[in-house]
Image (cartoon, rainbow, N blue to C red):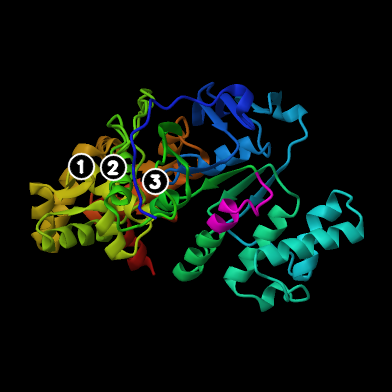
Amino acid sequence: MQETATPNATLEAPPAADAIIRAEKIEKYYAQPSQNRIQVISATDLSIVPGEILALLGPSGSGKSTMLRMLTGLSAPTAGQVYWHGTPISQAEINVSIVFQSFALFPWLTVLENVEAPLQARGVAPAERRERSMKMLDVVGLDGFEAAYPKELSGGMRQRVGFARALVVEPEVLFMDEPFSALDVLTAENLRSELLELWANKTMPTKAVFLVTHNIEEAVLLADRIIVLGRNPGHIRTDFPVKLAQPRDRKSEAFTQLVDYIYKVLTQPDVSPAEAPGQVTEPRLRDQRQMRYQMLPHARPGGIAGLLELLIDRGGRDDMYRLAEDLAFEIDDLLPIVDAAQMLGFLKVEEGDAAITTSGEEFANSEILRQKELFRNAAVENVLLLRQIRRALDAKSDHTVPEDFFMDMLGEQFSEEESQRQLETAVTWGRYAEIFDFDSARRRFVLPDALEEEIAPREEAK
């Protein structure tokens, strides 16, 4: 079947009456003692409709799993409402299942007993639950493995058990949270194909599928509709239908254009998304709320240097999609390095391509001491947190500042866990560039010379 990408009319949200699950202005945030709040997801509208595989993409920290938990009723939104066929989800009897990234099987139960477990929890009679479970194991290709235990199965077979267990209750919506990411490439590809076959043949007893993924190709291969989230806080950047005929050819121009488009949306968070190739959509603009601190990408200086050197070998510019493919990187592996290089001014992302800047080229071609100097200048100029730490150290007579001082400031904007991760990344960058050092024993930032002066008397005393 030849793959085509056909123009369509402006995408409109499905009528509320047609939606199985409908979210209206849902938000997730956490209150702080200072009366500020940490917002994880900003006010968002979203619908899940029958006959559709919907893929949710986004970088780490954009709230993909949080969104899934709110849509399934596992977590209540802080504001807004989720409806199940028009009834608030907290008051409705919902029928959904979730396939997780980890196989989440009971190791002490057989394959058949694992699949029967949700039916047993619902009070289904033994004879009926066995019949339904055996039928579902046959559907997912596990006939003959009923008496095996999870430890006897490969990763792909264990995930098949997870699919069978999720489908045996005949959910109206099947939710999947990165279900193929723990599998090897070939096994994951086989399971994706089998999932599509079950869906196309209507063998799956489900009306809609909601897939959370960080794999762009996976989303384009499977989905009828794709939503891309931005972060800080999580918000919908673009929501568009995929008008490519199944089966889809990864090497076709239409497929590649769509993958490149999504890469561009993910790597240009400050640019309003254009229309998806071959379709007309109304992109949703980035939340204009400005963060006081940039979120530091959790990338190491060595990774940044390696990426820049690779780009120089390729003439200073390369397609992001091809670059990730050649490195065998997933989007969550590559984006932090790209984001860090952009933040420092060493890299620009243009039309889906990563292009090295003049300062980036100088950094990549310099000796290590010069690299540290260039990194230091770029970091202090472009990264507010590093600049503040250095200025605070210069202002103090003893040239030391406690970690808690910056934890409190970051805590007004980020969760406690993310604040700690931000400081850890800041320490890694600051130490490399010799902007400051960190005394782990006392949990204090110090100037490099000040730490040496403190350590010397201690060593002499020993």
Magenta-highlighted residues: 195-206
Q: Which residue is mark 2?
A: 264
- Identify the mark at residue 244; answer none if there is no mark: 3
* Image quarter of the N terminus: bottom left
Is residue 284 shown above or below 405? above
Is residue 319 shown above or below 242? below
Residue at 65% from the left image edge and 58% from the top image edge: 163
Residue closest to the far front: 1
Residues at marks 3 and 1, CA–CA distance in whole angstroms: 22 Å
Q: Please state which of the two labelled residues, at mark 3 or mark 2, is closer to the viewer.
A: 3
The tag earlier along the polypeptide, 2 or 1, is 2
Q: Which residue is mark 1?
A: 351
Residues at marks 2 and 1, CA–CA distance in whole angstroms: 6 Å
Q: Is residue 14 magenta?
A: no
Q: Are marks 2 and 1 in contact (CB under 8 Å)?
A: yes
Q: Secondary structure at mark 1?
A: loop
287 or 127, which lies in front? Answer: 127
Find residue 285 and report its horizontal and vertical position in percent.
36, 25
Q: Secondary structure at mark 2?
A: helix
Amino acid at the residue labelled 1: Glu
Residue at 18% from the left image edge and 57% from the top image edge: 308
